[in-house]
Image (cartoon, grey):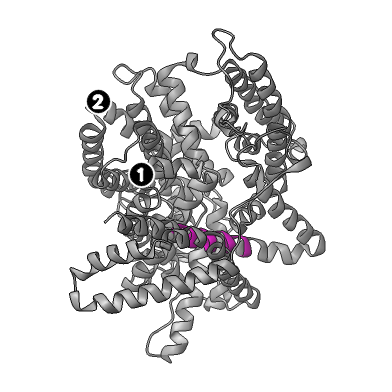
Amino acid sequence: MISSSEPAPARRHPDEFVLPLAGFTGTPEEKDRQWLEQCYRGDSERQLTLRAVLIGGCLGMFMAVSNLYTTLKIGWGFGVSITSCVISFVVWNALCSVARGRITRMGALENNCMQSTATAAGVSTGTTLATALGALLLIQGVHQPWYVAAAFVVCTAALGVFLAIPMKRQMINHEQLRFPSGIATAETLRSLYSKSPEAIRQAYSLIAALVAGALIGLFHTYGSLVEQLGDKKHLSAGLTKGLGKIHPQLTGWIEGVFHSFSGWLEKLSTKLYLPDVLAFGGMLNPLTRGQMSGLAYEPSVLLVGAGMITGLRVSLSMFGASVLLYFVVAPWLVGVDIANVGIAGYVPSFTLKPDGSFNPIRWALWGGTSVMVFSSLMQVALNWRAVLKAFMLFKKEERASLHDAAESVEVPNSWLIWGLIPISIALIAVQYFAFHIAVWLGIVSVAFSFIAALVCCRSTGETDTAPVGAMGKVTQLLYAVLPGAAGNITTNLMAAGTTGAAGGAAADLLTDLKSGYLLGANPRRQFLAQFFGVFFGVIAVVPAWYLMVPTKQVLEAFNPPATNMWKAVADLLTQGVHLLPRTALWAIVIGAFVGTILPVIEKLWPKTKTWLPSAMGIGLAWVVPFQNCFSFLIGALILTVWQKISQKNSDSYCIPVASGLVAGESIVAAFIAIGCTLVGFLLTQ
């Protein structure tokens, strides 16, 4: 498959393999030839195997559910590449040891193909559900049919996979963009398969943290399932009725097992549990009567792990902004509301319950959303050169030969055409029949997805951050003025959901292609693994969505920051600002100023970044409760102390430990939520 005028150099032993992190130089053709001769080994090692796809798909299904939960809980998901690589390495090696040679160990390229499947399943499928479709649920009060959600998620994720095809050749092969997370994944795989003692310890630290996070998540959330199981008689009747139809002879055995299990679980829950939250009182509660929702401590390692990953700067910004909201702004506004009761035309900032309690986030999300939207847009504007370069993707290049050796391993552009045509038609049809979006507006959303993918991919390659939220908000702004879309909140949300999901999926998958490029993988086979992964993710995440969030009320109980933000922007753009309290309008204006000025200061004076507050941290603090910000700070402080004690040790183990805590608790909490829904269903039978 490789043609070259010079013989290929002798292959190094895998233990001696060095990643080409410095990149290659010369013309595009010279770079391709250097990669083929010095790095490519996709024909000498197994890569796209059935077991790699199945293991990656199964891991991706769990991580898709995990990321759906974390998106509902804190507003974003986490990358699954390194986590899936490490779990696969440990689990598969353990199976090989048990099998005593009857199955072979998985190689580095095979594991890389596995993590590509896992990433497509775990990251590229759930974003739309927790944002656009979630916001639509809050507005309409009812779910879209499952087949609509499944079709929409499949089409947007697959669109992102195919949009990554042309980006890869330009941004990875020719421009040699960094894609830091892709480099980290490749380094992890290289270390694991070179049998580095440190890498092995990192792998086992991640597994240990995963188990610890799962146990804490279990003790933290299973109380809600025990409450559902409390009505044993009614539930037993529903269970027997449902399962008895399948096999009537098992009825007695089923009842006995159920009563034993539920009784044991109820006894355990009285002795071993973690409370949902520990509400602040006394001097820590600034109200004279009542309690602000979210003013508490939540014993959750998920949020602590997220704080360790996020770092001290963002976490301190979140905590400081949350303290400002809960201890200064909100109590002051309550006093203003009380003083203006009965004045004609005055819209209060908060809706107080009879006991004086209220939720500050219902008001603050307007200011927080404004900070994040304007900060994201300003970041894109300040990096206008990168955006401009994205539109030069298809500039004409002289190629040595149309049948160059690289062409035989790269994904051909014909795949892009043959893939985009049916996917685009299907996506436009879903938008038209399910959401009543005009055909031409659907075409605009698909076309704008290409622009969003260009920007997200380039931004990820240079900064490791995809401005998915900003591109979604740009789409919402666009559809707020397009004829036939202005004032239509469903069109506004679902068009933005299309561009945001496709752009984010393309950026995530390009990160995986970067790791494959460094490891010498075959791009075509890795692309196919990504495409297969989409279907694994949809199979898991769509049922999980309906089971985890069966009603609007359950979604509201999550207080989902990303969902609330999408709804808030859609409300504002389609219904007008006259519905908001005047104080919320001031919050929007001040938030816009803060979100604009902080990125400008950081750009003009880079040295200020170490002490300058994070705009995204400030904005997020006003759309999530205080208890989340407090846990973030705890995680960041743990990392800071760890770094002071041993910088080298923290650099090696922080990310594996934090990732394990996040994945472990979120997976268990998600399945507990699903279990509560299933039990509730049985109770209604």
Q: Inspect this view and state whether residue 62 appears.
A: yes
Residue to which mark 2 is pinned? 440
Residue at (70, 41) in percent of width and height: 319
User: Alpha-carbon neighbours of circle 1 within 10 Å: few (<14), some, or many (≥20)?
Assistant: many
- Helix, strand or loop: magenta stretch: helix
- Which x, y percent locates residue 532? 31, 59
Q: CA distance from mark 2 to mark 1?
A: 20 Å
Total numbered labels: 2
- Which x, y percent locates residue 482? 34, 18
Left or right: residue 499 compared with residue 384:
left
Q: Nearer the viewer, residue 186 or 128?
A: 128
Residue at (30, 51) in percent of width and height: 412
- Which x, y percent locates residue 426? 22, 41
Q: Nearer the viewer, residue 597 or 256?
A: 256
Q: Is residue 149 above or below residue 62?
A: above
- Which x, y percent locates residue 567? 44, 31
Q: Quadrant of the C terminus?
A: bottom left
Q: Inspect this view and state whether residue 81 appears.
A: no
Query: The disc labelled 1 sits on which kind of residue?
Result: Leu
Indicate which disc residue 163 carries: 1
Nearer the observer, disc 2 or disc 1?
2
Residue at (56, 73) in percent of width and height: 192
Indicate which disc residue 354 carries: none
Q: Residue furthest top?
A: 344
For label 1, the SS is helix
Query: The disc labelled 2 sits on which kind of residue?
Result: Trp
